[in-house]
């Protein structure tokens, strides 16, 4: 196995990765910016190296500097976590050129999935069902509009380079098209420096159901079932669960096979997530593939009993997949709620400040808290304001949901405004219990939640 792993990330995911590496006997190296000098991930790692000033672009996004550090400390592998450089093909390539293993898929696979339109072109050839739409090269305003007109409204404009829900606009009728396109392009340009757009049929009440896949370097691939991530605000996930409710065995197998087909079409290796929209008739459509570990991977770990970071490290070390498909099964039900420093009563504006009190629920086989902060830490303006992920498990959905609401009432934070009460209202609401869930959940239940 690797002897020394550098984690090119911060916060909860760095801590999460360090835990598994430690258990596997791998030495860990953390990076820290000025703001993170005393952070938990720094304390947990065997070694820690300063990477730069607080802004991400000067620290956690400094690809060449990170490579230099890895060479200096003698790391034989780099785990990029999620966000930052995790889906950056140039960084993956730099690792390769310097004989450091990038714990992730091959450079070509990252590149192939880096553009939503290129990805859809590849998946179309591989016969993976797609959200109907236009993902071609004609980017003229009138050309795009004529595709939208033909498709029929509503449509969704999406930045090919998009992520985090940015560069997307719904268009409900033809007269709104030009303004929406201009706005989406502007946002895409400022966020991704790339305003290539695709047009999709806007599905009005779909669910977001994604499949966790894993492939090794010997041509084998498995799926670790699905996660339902339909509860979203501004296209960003809030509560995720696994398995997805109402899945038949047949649909699960079909979606799993389609996801593996997607992965094989790009010679994928490692952990990947294939995101689908699922409509109420059981039709599913490929949206995109994320070529990294997802924020919400713990719900999959809870229902399969597997450690996905361990799987990633083993596959990256050129070992075969730890288990074959028929050795994998679903046990019970899990939820993840993302605890954020943000103000639900003020447009969910990110909040900052000192975590004067930070008292999470007690962890057990039913309750897991993945976090990168301790009491007294500062939630700064520099990074994503997620404080923790609260993950619960029980033998069925009702019991797991009861665990979730109870754990939320046991989560106490002072000093910084959080979304805990909002999450509690959401998890204990009648429609959430009754599985009346699609991607419009928050909008539809606005009155109950806020
Ligand atoms: P990003 O990469 O920015 O997260 P995605 O393509 O993954 O963007 O889409 C994010 C969310 O937007 C999805 O989970 C879904 O809720 C919604 N969405 C995306 N495409 C469509 C579509 N064609 N119709 C309806 N909703 C969509």
Image (cartoon, rainbow, N blue to C red):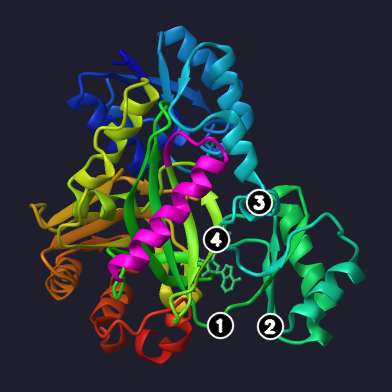
State the CA–CA distance, disc 1 to disc 3: 26 Å
Q: Which mark is residue 286?
A: 4
State the CA–CA distance, disc 2 to disc 3: 26 Å
Q: Predominant secondary structure in magenta?
A: helix
Q: Is residue 118 left or right of residue 271?
A: right
Mark 2 in CB contact with mark 1 (< 8 angstroms): yes
Please tell me whether mark 3 sits on a helix, a strand or a loop: helix
Point out the frontmost of discs 1 and 3. Answer: 3
Q: Which mark is residue 154?
A: 2
Sequence order check, earlier mark of 2 and 3:
3
Location of mark 1 (residue): 204
Mark 4 in CB contact with mark 3 (< 8 angstroms): no
- Residue 21 shows in this picture: yes
Location of mark 3 (residue): 125
Q: Which residues are magenta?
A: 248-271
Sequence order check, earlier mark of 4 and 3:
3
Q: Is residue 439 left or right of residue 13?
A: right
Sequence order check, earlier mark of 1 and 3:
3
- At x 50%, y 82%, the residue is 205
168 and 51: which is toward the camera: 168
406 and 284: which is toward the camera: 284
> Total marks drawn?
4
């Amino acid at each position: 196995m690797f002897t020394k792993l550098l984690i090119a990330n911060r916060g909860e995911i760095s801590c999460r990765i360090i835990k598994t590496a430690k258990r596997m006997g791998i030495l860990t190296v953390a990076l820290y910016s000025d703001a993170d000098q005393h952070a938990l991930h720094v304390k947990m790692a065997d070694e820690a190296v300063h990477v730069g000033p607080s802004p991400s672009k000067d620290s956690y996004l400094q690809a060449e500097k990170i490579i230099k550090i890895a060479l200096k400390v003698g790391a034989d592998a780099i785990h990029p976590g999620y966000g930052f450089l995790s889906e950056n093909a140039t960084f993956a390539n730099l690792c390769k050129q310097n004989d450091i293993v990038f714990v992730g898929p091959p450079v070509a696979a990252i590149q192939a999935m880096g553009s939503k339109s290129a990805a859809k072109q590849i998946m179309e050839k591989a016969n993976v069902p797609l959200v109907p739409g236009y993902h071609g090269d004609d980017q003229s305003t009138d050309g795009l509009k004529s595709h939208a007109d033909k498709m029929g409204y509503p449509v969704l404009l999406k930045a090919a380079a998009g992520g985090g829900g940015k560069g997307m606009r719904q268009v409900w009728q033809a007269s709104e098209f030009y303004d929406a396109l201009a706005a989406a392009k502007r946002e895409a340009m400022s966020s991704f420096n790339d305003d290539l757009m695709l047009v999709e049929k806007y599905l009005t009440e779909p669910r977001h159901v994604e499949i966790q896949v894993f492939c090794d370097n010997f041509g084998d691939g498995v799926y670790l079932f699905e996660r339902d991530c339909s509860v979203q605000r501004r296209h960003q996930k809030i509560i995720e669960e696994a398995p997805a409710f109402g899945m038949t065995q047949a649909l699960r197998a079909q979606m799993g096979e389609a996801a593996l087909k997607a992965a094989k079409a790009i010679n994928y290796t490692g952990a990947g997530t294939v995101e689908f929209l699922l409509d109420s008739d059981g039709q599913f459509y490929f949206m995109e593939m994320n070529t990294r570990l997802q924020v919400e991977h713990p719900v999959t770990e809870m229902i399969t009993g597997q450690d996905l970071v361990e799987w990633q490290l083993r596959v990256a070390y050129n070992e075969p997949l730890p288990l074959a498909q028929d050795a994998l099964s679903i046990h019970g039900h899990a939820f993840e709620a993302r605890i954020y420093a943000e103000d639900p009563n003020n447009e969910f504006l990110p909040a900052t400040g000192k975590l004067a009190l930070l008292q999470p629920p007690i962890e057990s086989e039913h309750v897991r808290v993945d976090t990168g902060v301790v009491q007294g830490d500062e939630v700064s303006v520099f990074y994503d304001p997620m404080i923790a992920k609260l993950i619960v498990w029980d033998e069925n959905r009702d019991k797991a949901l009861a665990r979730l609401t109870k754990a939320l009432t046991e989560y106490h934070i002072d000093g910084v405004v959080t979304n805990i009460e909002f999450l509690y209202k959401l998890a204990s609401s009648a429609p959430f219990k009754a599985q009346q869930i699609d991607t419009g959940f928050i909008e539809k239940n606005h009155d109950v939640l806020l």
